[in-house]
């Protein structure tokens, strides 16, 4: 019998003021994981604009920096694994969005981390119905963490 585990590898590819610590990032990730995901492994990588721009171009065919990219692990049929995938977050974009949206930086970081985890779990926001489901889940998780509704008073961030 194996032990259950949740492994969150946090990688800092850059260091600037305002990036949350590993403990905060892990707390936000674990909050976003459903109770039935007692085995989970994922990586959260904090990067600069150059790295996320290259990834955005390579994997989404889009130019420019974005706040977060999620790369769900595509497993081999019949092989069980706890690996969920990778989340890549651009620290400068998150910081500039927090200022532009008049949000506390830590609240926006929590939102972006939760948003990335939900993508790994299969949530998306490409269609209105899915977006509403994802935004509702994000809001509930963030309120449970003590943060305000990230969508309050604004249009959806799709």
Image (cartoon, rainbow, N blue to C red):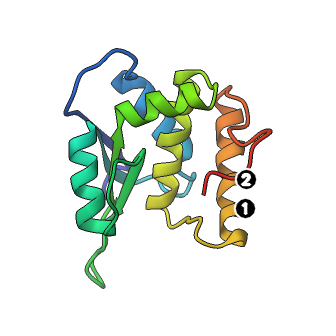
Q: Is residue 149 left or right of residue 117?
A: right
Q: Quadrant of the N terminus?
A: bottom left
Q: Residue at x 30, y 58 (%)?
A: 56
Image quadrant assignment for residue 132: bottom right
- Residue 99's spot in the image, x, y percent? 55, 25
Asked if marks 2 and 1 touch (Cβ < 8 Å), the reply is yes
Q: Disc 1 on helix, strand or loop?
A: helix
Residue drawn at 30 percent across, 73 percent down:
74
Nearest the camera: 100 or 114? 100
Residue sitting farthest toward the bottom: 77
Q: Is residue 5 above or below residue 23?
A: below
Q: Name the residue: 25% across, 80% down.
A: 76
Cα–Cα span, label 2 and label 1: 6 Å
Which residue in the protein does label 1 denote?
Answer: 132
- Residue 116 percent location from the top left of the image: 46, 50
* Residue identified by numbered label 2: 136
- Element at label 2: helix
Which residue is farthest front? 63
Give the residue at the far right of this rendering.
Answer: 153
């Amino acid at each position: 019998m194996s032990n259950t585990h949740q492994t969150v590898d946090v990688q800092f590819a850059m260091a600037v003021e305002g990036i949350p610590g590993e403990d905060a990032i892990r707390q936000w990730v674990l909050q976003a994981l459903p109770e039935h995901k007692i085995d989970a492994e994922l990586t959260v990588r904090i990067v600069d604009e150059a790295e996320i721009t290259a990834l955005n171009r390579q994997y989404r065919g889009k130019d420019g920096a974005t706040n977060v990219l999620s790369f769900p692990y595509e497993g081999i049929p019949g092989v069980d694994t706890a690996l969920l995938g990778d989340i890549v977050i651009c620290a400068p974009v998150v910081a500039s969005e927090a200022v532009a949206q008049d949000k506390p930086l830590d609240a926006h970081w929590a939102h972006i981390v939760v948003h990335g985890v939900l993508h790994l779990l299969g949530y998306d926001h490409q269609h209105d119905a899915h977006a509403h489901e994802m935004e509702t889940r994000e809001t509930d998780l963030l309120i449970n963490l003590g943060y305000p509704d990230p969508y309050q008073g604004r249009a959806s961030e799709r």
